[in-house]
Amino acid sequence: MQTHLVGRDMITTQEWTKDELDTVFNVALDLKRKRALGEPHAYLRDRVLMMLFFFSSTRTRASFEAGMAQLGGHAEFIDSTTTQIKHGDTGKEIGEILGRYGDGIAIRQCDWAVGNQYIRGVAEHSRSPVLNMQCDWYHPFQALADMLTLFEKLGDVRGKTLNVSYAYASSYEKPMSAPQSLILLASRYGMNVRLTRPPEFKLMPEIVAQTEENARKSHGSFEILEDFDAGFEDADAVYAKAWGAMLTTTDAAESARIGAKYTDWITDERRMSLTRNGEGLYMHPLPADRNIEVTDGVIDGPNSVVYDEAENRLHVQKAVMALTMR
Ligand code: CP
């Protein structure tokens, strides 16, 4: 249990030690228990989280706001389009100023080749901790919630197989931040991490290299497959979602043309029957493109844990806020 986390940024879990991450999970479970029992846990009374969104959100906004209220503080929602950012406020100014008004700054900025750099720039100039609510590279709170769900459902995750897979979606070019954060985190915990994706949907080479190193250190494993069905075989959990072909092309129309080659990459009942004993967990961070990325039968089926993942966003975020913003 680590007790020195006040003031720390959470931009990627990769910058937190295993002991520190264990502390987050430990505190998250304690806060989940307290909420279930109705026990007060106002550790952040009078504290303010400044939440700056460059992109829309359902779960992230709602869970951070609810979490701050339950911790006795306040979350201020700021839509970037209503600010002076487009008239010149820089990342430095956002960090300096919002960091003085509040006790933490949370940011969602997912623009490819911009988001992570922007959040890092704000963090450099903020006296308060900066929390990454999703950028182009990372979605750390989603990965923490996914990992907590895996602990709850699988128990000891060491040696268990997690298939993080591309799936087709027609809606828009989704960030690669959720799969990148999850392979980074699951590989810290000794899982057999499997990344399944078409050749045009590679993840960032530095993230893949860090995942390989994490797996080596944790005595887990990491493999990359290009056959969608093979990814399901004997998996204990399947996390199949769409992301964009940003490393192949930055042209959205070309990306859509490439994606259209993989419309059969949909998670369905036959594929889920290939998982361990036909009972592998189905995971997705949401929102999902129903009957394009995944059938209704799977996402609403008995092995789907999507709502537990969404709930756990609340608990892990409260844990990180309580640990860093006191
Ligand atoms: N999973 C997730 O981040 O959901 P939102 O985009 O709705 O916040």
Image (spheres, rainbow, N blue to C red):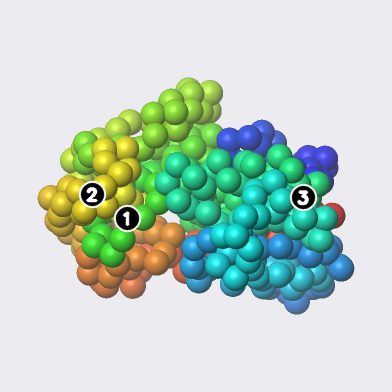
Quadrant, the N terminus: top right
Residue drawn 61% across and 46% down? Answer: 119
Q: Amino acid at mark 2?
A: Ser
x%, y% of residue 305? 43, 63
Check mark 2 vs ligand 1: CB closer than 8 Å? yes or no: no
Q: Is mark 1 within 8 Å of ligand 1?
A: no
Q: Secondary structure at mark 3?
A: helix
312 and 277: which one is in front?
312
Q: Is residue 143 left or right of residue 244?
A: right
Question: Which amino acid lies under the numbered mark 1 shown in the image of this protein?
Answer: Glu
Which residue lies at the image location 30% right of the left edge and 44% below the top edge?
Answer: 250
Residue 214's spot in the image, x, y percent?
Answer: 51, 28
Is residue 68 shown above or below 138? below
Taking depth in this image into account, of 144 and 99 the one nearest to the observer is: 99
Mark 1 or mark 3: which is in front? 3
* Mark 1 residue crowding within 10 angstroms, few (<14) / some (14–19) / many (20+): some
The CA distance from mark 2 to mark 3 is 38 Å
Label disc, if present, on residue 173 of the rendered structure = 1
Residue 96 - label: 3
Q: CA distance from mark 1 to mark 3?
A: 32 Å
Of mark 2 and mark 3, the one earlier in the sequence is: 3
Decide if residue 23 is on the left or right side of residue 296: right
Measured from the top left, where is residue 319 in percent x and y? Answer: 71, 56
Q: Residue furthest front?
A: 87
Q: Is residue 307 visible?
A: yes
Q: Earlier in the sequence, mark 1 or mark 2?
A: 1
Q: How many marks?
A: 3
Which label sits on residue 255? 2
